[in-house]
Amino acid sequence: MRVLKSTLGFSLLGLMLAGQAQAVTTVTGTVNASLVLTTSCLINGVVGANGAVFGALDFGTATSLFDTASAQVLSGTGAMTVLCTAGTTPSVTLGAGAHDGMAAAQGTRALASGSNYVGYDLYSDVGHGTPVAIGGNVTLSQSTGVVQTVNIYGKATGKVGLPAGTYTDTIAVVLTF
């Protein structure tokens, strides 16, 4: 009888536990996922940020008796490039240089070596037919997500009496998109 009670007790306990397992409730739902993308541009293959170097306008080496020298703004791998978010229209504004107007007879901008100046101007074409004024823009096509080349050319004009030296300038550049 004792064995029967014991077996019966375990059986009842098993049924109670099985009944509880069947009483499990489930709840279903969702997880919402999102990602916000903002417009951006790469300048010469690098994410654009304030203080970016857009390139260099290197007129090379010439004698102090040179007439004119031409150059193109180049990055480390060639012409300056931008790659912007598709649907944006990038524009490059060429702001003031450090010595603008100091050699007005030779150009609107100036390279300086001490108190000596070599005038130069910027252009959007290799033939120097379309000048880009101080504060002027080089507007590109609406971006399709493909790299665009920004062609900026310079032409420096010499004058009699220039001493030998390294002449430099820094031009402010703003990329708007």
Image: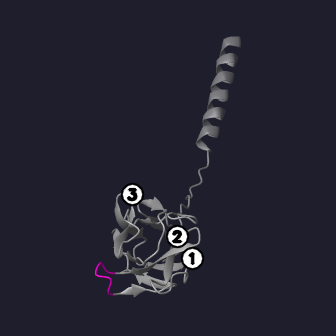
Q: Please provide percent x and percent y for residue 34.
A: 53, 63
In the depicted view, which residue is nearer to us: 120 or 26?
Answer: 120
Please give the name of the residue rendered at 51% of the width and 67% of the height, measured from the top-left corner: 168
- C-beta proximity under 8 Å, tags 2 and 1: yes
Q: Which residue has dot 3 on it?
A: 76
Image quarter of the N terminus: top right
Say which amino acid is labelled 2: Asp
- How many angstroms separate mark 2 from mark 1 (CA)? 7 Å
| Secondary element at tag 2 | loop
- Report how many numbered discs are placed on residues in the image: 3
* Residue at the disc numbered 1: 99
Give left or right: position of 135 versus 15. left
- The range drawn in magenta is 125-129
Q: Is mark 1 on a helix, strand or loop?
A: loop
Q: Quadrant of residue 59?
A: bottom left
Using the image, tell me which numbered label, if any, was put on residue 169. 2
- For the question of whether residue 128 can be seen, the reply is yes
Tag 3 and tag 2, C-beta contact below 8 Å? no
Q: Which of marks 1 and 3 is nearer the N terminus?
A: 3
Instruction: Please name which of the two marks, 3 or 2, marks the residue nearer to the observer.
Output: 2
Q: Distance between the residues labelled 3 and 2?
A: 19 Å
Q: Per the image, is 128 magenta?
A: yes
Q: Residue at x 28, y 81 (%)?
A: 127
Spot the residue most to the left.
127
Q: Nearer the viewer, residue 8 or 49?
A: 49
Q: Which of marks 2 and 1 is nearer the N terminus?
A: 1
> Element at badge 3?
loop
